[in-house]
Image: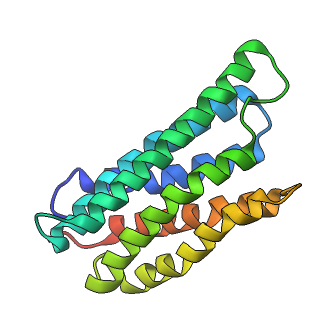
């Protein structure tokens, strides 16, 4: 990493994963709203560090890193939207948010797949961050694109939601750790 800000930004990937893990286990609308907002914040921070690392090897035009950031920004907006839905539940003391988690998982599957496809391809081609992590990310792309088909089936369950969210979350966390551990240039 070239810049001293990249390491703290890279930690955003871990923050994203932790916030989503806590969201999955807590059953409090206020806490869930806040955790989802934090997840969006941390994902954007992580994307800044990821873009810097990928762009350093891609060059000035950096189409793959730009695609990863655009996809990640759309996903982060989705997490922020879900946070707002949970905030309305907490504020109005409703029983359920006006967005189902399965619908949300369907929505974010596509931009998360774009992040995985673009960033993992750059990583696998150049070896930046870690080539095996790039190959793993590429392997997750079909899973990420197939998850919405499972979510379209009637009565999608927690497994289908996990299929849509967990691989991306795990890949972000692993990439975050490797970005932080990389020696400075």
Q: Going 43% across and 86% down the picture, which residue do you hit?
A: 132
Q: Going 83% across and 57% down the picture, which residue do you hit?
A: 156
Quarter in which the N terminus is drawn: bottom left
Q: Going 89% across and 55% down the picture, which residue do you hit?
A: 155
Quadrant location of residue 176? bottom left
The percent position of residue 54, horizontal first and vertical second, equals 25, 68
Residue 144 in view of the camera: yes
Horizontal placement of 168 versus 12: left or right? right
Residue 178 in view of the camera: no
Horizontal placement of 154 versus 172: left or right? right
The percent position of residue 100, horizontal first and vertical second, equals 75, 40
Against 152, residue 25 (above or below) is above
Quadrant location of residue 101? top right
Closer to us: 22 or 58: 58
- Most extreme residue toward the left is 60
Q: Going 45% across and 84% down the picture, which residue do you hit?
A: 135
The percent position of residue 177, horizontal first and vertical second, equals 43, 66
Horizontal placement of 117 versus 38: left or right? left
The percent position of residue 98, horizontal first and vertical second, equals 74, 29
Against 118, residue 109 (above or below) is above
Quadrant location of residue 144? bottom right
Count of labels shown?
Answer: 0
């Amino acid at each position: 990493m070239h810049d001293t800000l990249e390491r703290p930004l890279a930690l955003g990937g871990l923050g994203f994963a932790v916030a989503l893990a806590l969201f999955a286990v807590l059953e409090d609308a206020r806490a869930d709203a806040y955790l989802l907002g934090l997840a969006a914040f941390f994902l954007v921070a992580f994307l800044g560090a990821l873009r810097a690392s990928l762009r350093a090897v891609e060059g000035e035009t950096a189409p793959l890193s730009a695609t990863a950031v655009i996809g990640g920004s759309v996903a982060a907006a989705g997490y922020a939207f879900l946070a707002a839905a949970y905030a309305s539940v907490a504020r109005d003391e409703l029983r359920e948010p006006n967005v189902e988690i399965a619908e949300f998982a369907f929505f974010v599957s596509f931009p998360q797949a774009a992040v995985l496809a673009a960033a993992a391809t750059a990583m696998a081609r150049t070896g930046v961050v870690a080539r095996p992590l790039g190959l793993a990310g590429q392997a997750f792309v079909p899973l990420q694109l197939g998850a919405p088909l499972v979510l379209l089936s009637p009565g999608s369950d927690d497994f289908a939601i996990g299929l849509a969210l967990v691989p991306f979350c795990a890949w972000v966390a692993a990439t975050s750790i490797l970005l932080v551990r990389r020696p400075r240039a």
